[in-house]
C-alpha cells in the first residue's frame, strides 16, 4: 500500500499484487477519513478530514496561524519573509533545526496520519505501507509518530506485521505510477513488464 502525503493526501491500494480501484475507482481516498471532530473544513465540504489537518497545505496553514498569534517559534521566522508564504517544507526545516513549535506541528500531523493508517491496518492487514509525497521528506520526524500511533490504535496482530517505511522514488513516484497504470490498463496480463519499469527509468 502506498500513501501520498503532499498538498493532498491519497493512497494506492495493491491487494494480492493487483492495484485495487473500487466500484467507482475512488478507492484510496484516505485523505477524506474524518480523524478529528473539531477540525477545519476540508475541500470536500466535511470537517476534520485527514487532508484538512495533515496535508502540506494544512501544515503550512497551521504554522501561518500560529506565527500570526505570536507562538515562540525559534527558527521558522528566520526561514520566511512572511507568515503568509510559509510552506510545509519550511516547517520541516525549522523542526529539523530544533524549533519545538515547528516540530509540534509536524508531530500533530503525523498522529492524524497514524489514526487514518490504523483504520487501513485493521481493515486490510497490509504487509507494508510506503509513505511518499513532499511531506514525507520530513523523514523520521513524521514516520516515528505515525508508527507510534499505529502501535496504540491498530489491532496487535495486524500492527505487529505491517512495515511503515518512507518511499525511495521521490518525485519520480508520480510519473512511474502513471506509467504503471497505463501498462496495467493496456496490458493487464503483462505483470513482469510493470515491475521492470523501475529498471528502465532514467537514474538521476
Ligand atoms: Zn474531505
Image: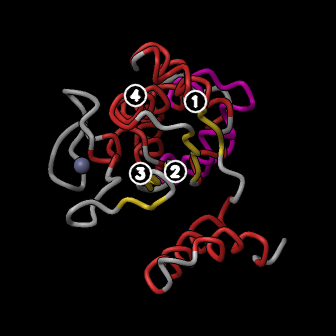
67 or 165: nearer the viewer: 165
Quadrant of the image containing the C terminus: bottom right
Element assignment for label 2: strand
> Label 3: which residue?
9
Q: CA distance from mark 4 to mark 3?
A: 15 Å
Would residue 8 appear left or right of 163 to someone viewing this image?
A: left
Is residue 25 part of the magenta span, yes or no? no
Q: Which mark is in front, 4 or 3?
A: 4
Tag 3–tag 1 contact (CB < 8 Å) = no
Q: Residue at x 54, y 32 (%)?
A: 106
Q: CA distance from mark 2 to mark 4?
A: 14 Å
117 or 101: nearer the viewer: 117
> Label 1: which residue?
102
Q: Percent position (x, y) of residue 16?
A: 47, 51
Element assignment for label 4: helix
> Label 4: which residue?
118
Quick one: label 3, few (<14), some, or many (20+) residues within 10 Å? many
Q: Which mark is in front, 3 or 1?
A: 3
Element assignment for label 3: strand
Amino acid at each position: 500500500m502506498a500513501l501520498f502525503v503532499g498538498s493532498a493526501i491519497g493512497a494506492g491500494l495493491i491487494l494480492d499484487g493487483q492495484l485495487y480501484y473500487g466500484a467507482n475507482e475512488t478507492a484510496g481516498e484516505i485523505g477524506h477519513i474524518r480523524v478529528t471532530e473539531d477540525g477545519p473544513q476540508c475541500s470536500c465540504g466535511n470537517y476534520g478530514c485527514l487532508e484538512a489537518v495533515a496535508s502540506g497545505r494544512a501544515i503550512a496553514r497551521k504554522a501561518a496561524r500560529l506565527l500570526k498569534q505570536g507562538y515562540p517559534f525559534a527558527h521558522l521566522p528566520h526561514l520566511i519573509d512572511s507568515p503568509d508564504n510559509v510552506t510545509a517544507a519550511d516547517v520541516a526545516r525549522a523542526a529539523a533545526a530544533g524549533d519545538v513549535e515547528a516540530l509540534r506541528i509536524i508531530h500533530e500531523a503525523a498522529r492524524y496520519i497514524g489514526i487514518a493508517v490504523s483504520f487501513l491496518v485493521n481493515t486490510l492487514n497490509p504487509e507494508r505501507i510506503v509513505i511518499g509525497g513532499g511531506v514525507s521528506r520530513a523523514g523520521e520526524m513524521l514516520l516515528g509518530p505515525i508508527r507510534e500511533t499505529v502501535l496504540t490504535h491498530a489491532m496487535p496482530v495486524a500492527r505487529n506485521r505491517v512495515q511503515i517505511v518512507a518511499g525511495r522514488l521521490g518525485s519520480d513516484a508520480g510519473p512511474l505510477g502513471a506509467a504503471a497504470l497505463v501498462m496495467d490498463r493496456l496490458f493487464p496480463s503483462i505483470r513482469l513488464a510493470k515491475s521492470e519499469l523501475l529498471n528502465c527509468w532514467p537514474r538521476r
